[in-house]
Amino acid sequence: MKVIVKKNYDEVSEIAAQEIVDLVKNKNNAVLGLPTGSTPVGMYKNVVKSYKNGEISFKNITTFNLDEYIGLNKDNDQSYYYFMNNNLFSHIDINRDNINIPNGMADDLENECKRYEEKLKAVGYMDIMYLGIGINGHIGFNEPAEYFEPFTHEVKLEESTIEANSRFFEKVEDVPTSALTMGIKTIFSAKKIILIATGENKADAIAKTVNGKIDPQVPASILQLHRDVTIIVDEAAGSRL
């Protein structure tokens, strides 16, 4: 596990984006695992900037998103489909058929999870997987639990997660209480994992991830076992390392 501490959010966003740019330059049919939330917004802005500068093309790139809320359709401005389109996909030349996001509106959620796993297997899994981290140590929507869930699955969101995500909604009651998320084994299938975190409120989770015991109550701690993990944090998020 490699830890990089940068001064601030902008520097974290720049270095995280450069990893994508370098990969796409070297492998024009790469498979990317992508996150949502406030943390990667700056990263996506930098990636779009590189695309608009003519440095890279996404025509043959395939993407898989980590998760999606259950019960929000694609047009809902709080869905992760909407987020990805607004922050990345509508600004680059990606083939829409190569965009993969779990369908939180599927009639059969169990089959949707199986379908997503099969799609991942068909492309040979991800070259790089980007993660954020929750204040409770969740990655994707893998919440603290008694065991690590391996594959894409439905999950009931923790109250702390709902509360943290309520800043994006008009009121906390509007936040979905469940989601579909890649599981730990699915995340681990990626050749390389990059976790990005900023802000003092993430410092405890980062410290437990890097130096704590591997514990399903701190889902990100399992990253200690992956063969190629880089954690990029600002000084505030890295303050307890």
Image (cartoon, grey):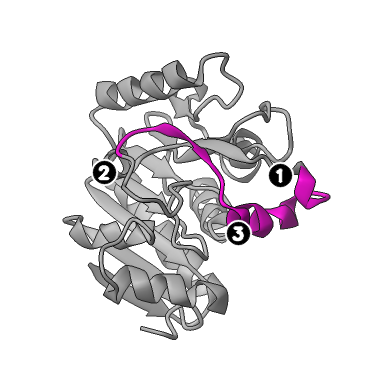
Q: Is residue 167 magenta?
A: yes
Q: Are marks 3 and 2 in contact (CB under 8 Å)?
A: no
The answer for how far apart the CA atoms under marks 1 and 3 are is: 12 Å
Secondary structure of the residue carrying numbered label 2: loop
Residue, x 44% and y 85% (percent of image)? 239
The answer for how far apart the CA atoms under marks 1 and 2 are is: 29 Å
The picture places residue 199, in percent across and down from the top left corner, at 55, 75
Q: Is residue 215 left or right of residue 45?
A: left
User: Could you tell me which quadrant the C terminus lies in?
Assistant: bottom left
Q: Is residue 233 left or right of residue 175?
A: left
Range covered by the magenta-colored residues: 150-173
Residue placed under numbered mark 2 in the picture: 190
Tell me which numbered mark, 1 or 2, is placed earlier along the sequence. 1
Kindly indicate the quadrant of the structure image that contains residue 5.
Answer: bottom left
Q: Are marks 1 and 2 in contact (CB under 8 Å)?
A: no
The picture places residue 117, in percent across and down from the top left corner, at 33, 25
Question: Viewer-proximal residue, 211 or 156?
Answer: 156
Q: Nearer the viewer, mark 1 or mark 3?
A: 3
Label 1 is placed on what type of residue?
Val
The answer for how far apart the CA atoms under marks 3 and 2 are is: 28 Å
Residue placed under numbered mark 1 in the picture: 175
Q: Is residue 62 above or below residue 12?
A: above
Label 2 is placed on what type of residue?
Ala
Label 3 is placed on what type of residue?
Ser
Q: Nearer the viewer, mark 3 or mark 2?
A: 3
Label ID, residue 160 = 3
Q: Is residue 159 magenta?
A: yes
Q: Is residue 14 above or below residue 174?
A: below
